[in-house]
Image: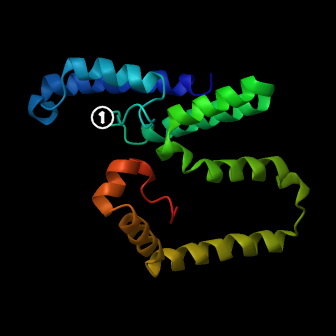
């Protein structure tokens, strides 16, 4: 319900606005046809755009890829949390197979967020310590980016996968998993 309240209006709005754009500026949209929109909308409505089954992006809505990830994290977590016995194993594995490597590669980061949310109230720190953690994090991030560590990690991981083009083809939005 949380995702569909955003996803369906988003898909519909993109289709509407792109239809208007196709009418007013056909040259800018010449690589898209109406039949493309039907398949894009169907795949996107089931959050399969970045799954094992498809590699589909919603045109002009770049951030939509992340909803595909989030939906599968909810499905996997829900199956693990609410089901028991063989049903749990079966549904978790099935969801993981459908989600695929592109999505699963960020699952540990999502689970770390779940862990932090579940346990953040137990951590009682003085206000000064909180501010220090924020500024140290910002400083580390500035160094990480400024020194090019993130790009070096990406290049190293991409080389293992056969080069940047291979990494992009295989992992799409997850290609920078190591520095991320």
Give 21 or 62, whichever is nearer the viewer. Answer: 62
Q: Residue at x 49, y 35 (%)?
A: 68
How many labels were placed on the picture? Answer: 1
Report which quarter residue 34 is drawn in.
Answer: top left
Report which quarter residue 73 is drawn in.
Answer: top right
Which residue sits furthest front?
Answer: 86
**At which x and y percent is residue 134?**
69, 69
- Asked if residue 10 lies left or right of residue 3, the reply is left
Q: Which residue is mark 1?
A: 59
Give 128 or 164, whichever is nearer the viewer. Answer: 164
Q: Residue at x 57, y 28 (%)?
A: 3
The correct choice, above or below, for 26 with respect to 149 in the image is above
**At which x and y percent is residue 31?**
15, 32
**At which x and y percent is residue 117?**
77, 48
Disc 1, SS: loop
The correct choice, above or below, for 28 with respect to 9 in the image is below
- Asked if residue 126 lies left or right of residue 145, the reply is right
Q: Is residue 12 visible?
A: no
Q: Residue at x 38, y 61 (%)?
A: 161
Give 75 or 100, whichever is nearer the viewer. Answer: 100
State the quadrant of the N terminus.
top right
The correct choice, above or below, for 48 with respect to 169 in the image is above
Give 50 or 129, whichever is nearer the viewer. Answer: 50
- Asked if residue 176 lies left or right of residue 30, the reply is right
Report which quarter residue 139 is drawn in.
Answer: bottom right
Q: Is residue 65 visible?
A: yes
**At which x and y percent is residue 163?**
31, 64
Answer few, some or many: residues within 10 Å of disc 1's Cα (few below 14, many 20 plus, some between 14 and 19): some
- Colouring scheme applied when the structure was drawn: rainbow
Q: Residue at x 51, y 43 (%)?
A: 103
């Amino acid at each position: 319900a949380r995702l569909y309240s955003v996803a369906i209006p988003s898909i519909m709005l993109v289709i509407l606005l792109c239809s208007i754009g196709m009418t007013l500026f056909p040259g800018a949209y010449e690589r898209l046809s109406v039949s493309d929109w039907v398949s894009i909308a169907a795949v996107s409505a089931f959050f399969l755009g970045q799954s094992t089954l498809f590699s589909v992006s919603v045109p002009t809505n770049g951030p939509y890829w992340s909803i595909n990830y989030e939906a599968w994290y909810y499905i996997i977590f829900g199956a693990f949390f609410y089901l028991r016995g063989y049903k749990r194993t079966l549904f978790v594995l099935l969801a993981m197979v459908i989600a695929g490597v592109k999505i699963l590669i960020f699952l540990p980061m999502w689970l770390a967020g779940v862990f932090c949310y579940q346990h953040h109230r137990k951590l009682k720190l003085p206000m000064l310590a909180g501010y220090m953690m924020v500024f140290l994090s910002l400083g580390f991030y500035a160094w990480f980016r400024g020194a090019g560590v993130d790009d070096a990690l990406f290049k190293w991981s991409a080389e293992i996968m056969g080069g940047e083009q291979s990494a992009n083809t295989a992992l799409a939005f997850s290609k920078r998993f190591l520095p991320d």
